[in-house]
Amino acid sequence: MKKLYNSFPMEEARIRKLEALRERGINPYPYKFEVTDAIGNIRKEFETDPPEGLRVRVRGKAKRVSRTEEGYMVRLSDEENVEILVFTKEEGLKPGEEYTFTGFLVRVEGKLSLKEAELSEGEVQSIREIKEKYDKDPNRKRVSLGGRLVALRSMGKAIFGHIQDLTGKIQIYLRKDIVGEENFSFFNEFIDLGDIIGVRGELFRTNTGELTLEVQSFKLLAKCLHPLPEKWHGLKDVEVRYRQRYLDLIANPEARRTFLLRSRLISELRRFFDERGFVEVETPILQTVASGANAKPFVTYHNYLEMNLYLRIAPELYLKRLIVGGFPRVYELGRNFRNEGVDRTHNPEFTMVEFYTAYWDYNDLMRFTEELFAHILEKTVGSLKINYEGKELDFTPPFRKVRYFELLKEKTGKDKDFFLRDLEGLRKLAKELEINNYDKLTHAKLIDKVFEKVAEGDLIQPTFVIDFPKLLSPLAKTHREDPDLVERFELIVASYELANAYTELNDPADQKKRFIEQIKEKEMGDEEAMDMDEDFIRALEYGMPPTAGEGIGIDRLVMLLSNTDTIRDVILFPHMRPQWSD
RNA sequence: GAGCCGGUAGCUCAGUCGGUAGAGCAACGGCCUUUUAAGCCGUGGGUCCCGGGUUCGAUCCCCGGCCGGCUCACCA
């Protein structure tokens, strides 16, 4: 029997309960429960956020002092037991002592709290009055809620707990004299931390002021057979967080926040394009030629056709075929696959949005990009300035623009002619810069490496690097003023290449020449050089209007917005080696 | 792919200069009708990642492997 479940000795009690429930004719996994509200909506209905930057001074007795990652959390309570949480870095606070704190009034996980609080003196506001201002009386409103039981405090003839759904957490309160003796002992006997339950009852506030559901009836909705991660420290083990993301999402509010942010970003992005007349399209992921970017593809095999297929490294060439086909504005939001290393900023599958606009050039695209970023930031984090790893990034348009070779000259003292015509000198420079394989790299790769080494690290604020060398950009249109260059820009933020864009090459003969160059590069050992796509050339021969196109890396954008330094923290199920060999 | 670091109870961690291990939370049994990291009393729980070697004896030392993290290389 135990083999049926993934069990450890300490879970035997839960499995015994499950079996006992079934013997009583109670289904531990019932079909349905009528839920009236999301927990977060209930909280929003009765709790308002204090204005930003509001400082208050309060006095009370420290009921508990707990260490947090940075400082302390104090439960401060007045004579009537009304409580407020205080987050402070003050040392030496003792439970039972009276303190006066000044701090910013904010809501943390639904509870009114003082942030960045400091000990102070002077006129204080009553905790009760502050709370009454922002926490409204729910007036015994009747609701029916569903969620996971994440805290449980049994007190004899009453039980407190918290249930949690994606939108929030709320306290529940069971009383023996309200639910009845039989139900009360059923709860005590069969309901465990981690179970999914449905509860019906009336909302009220406890003496301490916490919004609470007084339970009149409840129902077990799904038994949890494993103990949850620790309630105070959460789930820290990164391996478990990635492999069992559901546990991360249950235990760590930051994880929930990040993925909700990602979701909001993606829907805002869609809305932004849709409102501007872009058509969302889907192009092949299985491709016969992997082109459109410089990268190694994953190879797979089609049994019926008896041929290799490649997972796309970019949708670019298909999207441009659609421009030829008369779709003037298209975008595709989706996964690309690149068979390369895995590290903090690279996952084998990653998300990009690529979009193309007929009749535009890359100058139009820069303005559009500024507008797009402003929109996304406004709608996700609510500000054009964000903090990333201690640096303030300012996305207020216009972004800085700097020419590729101007930046190189500033950093190395060498001009465009040096980089494009003096291969030997360039190789020497690469050697001085300790660039790996400087003696084997192709000319194009050498320029690219030197640029990355000397220039990218300093580009922190949003910057358009413009007018790339043609050698590096086989799909971009030759610069109207300089045949060595193409009309291309990258948007670099915090040293990440966040976007890559150009006026599209629409001259089929030029495109063919560029592909042939790429094939030469490949023969010279550049594994990532592009393959020829004959049908794409044919499409261009039918005529592609002047077009500008851009790709934006979504994962890295989410990293910036959520202030995380690991791509794995913004991908729900990042790539991992298998845990079990069978 | 290389170098460095790590893997101890369900979770968060401590520890053993080589004598098979502890705490808090969680669990189990009690007490408690406004608690909230609830509290109090009691109990159980470990292939110390896996395999081999050295040793009277290995969770600890050595070798190999698996998984993870960081750095580097490739890439976005």
Image (cartoon, rainbow, N blue to C red):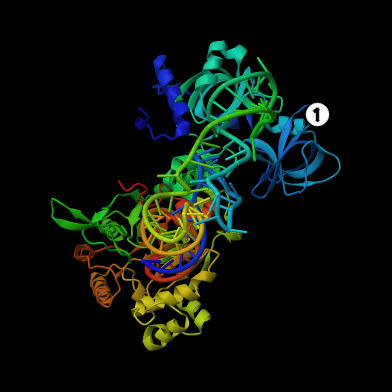
Furthest residue in direction right, as rendered: A122
- For the point 53% across and 80% down, which residue is it? A410
Q: Position of residue A129 (x, y in %)?
A: 76, 31
The residue closer to the viewer here, A526 or A106, is: A526
Say which quarter of the image contains residue A342: bottom left
**Depth check, front residue: A195 or B44:** B44
Near-viewer residue (A432 or A446): A432
For residue A141, say whether it is visible.
no
Q: Is residue A24 above or below residue A353?
A: above
Q: What chain does badge 1 belong to?
A: A
* Image quarter (top left, top right, bottom left or bottom right) of the N terminus of chain A: top left
Instruction: Give the percent coordinates (x, y) of residue A295.
Output: 32, 65
- Across the whole image, how many numbered discs are drawn on residues? 1
Q: Quadrant of the C terminus of chain A?
A: top left
Which residue is depicted at the point 53% across and 11% down?
Answer: A182
Q: Residue at x 44, y 45 (%)?
A: A267
The image shows residue A409, relative to residue A507, as above or below, that is below
Dot 1: few (<14), some (14–19), or many (≥20) neighbours within 10 Å? few
Q: Is residue A457 visible?
A: yes
| Image coordinates for residue A262, horizontal then vertical, percent | 47, 47
**Left or right: A227, with A301 as reference point:** right
Residue A504: image quadrant is: bottom left
Helix, strand or loop at mark 1 = loop
Going by the image, does A235 lie left or right of A130? Answer: left
> Where residue A377 appears, x then y in whole percent?
53, 52
Residue bearing the label numbered 1: A79
Q: Amino acid at mark 1?
A: Glu
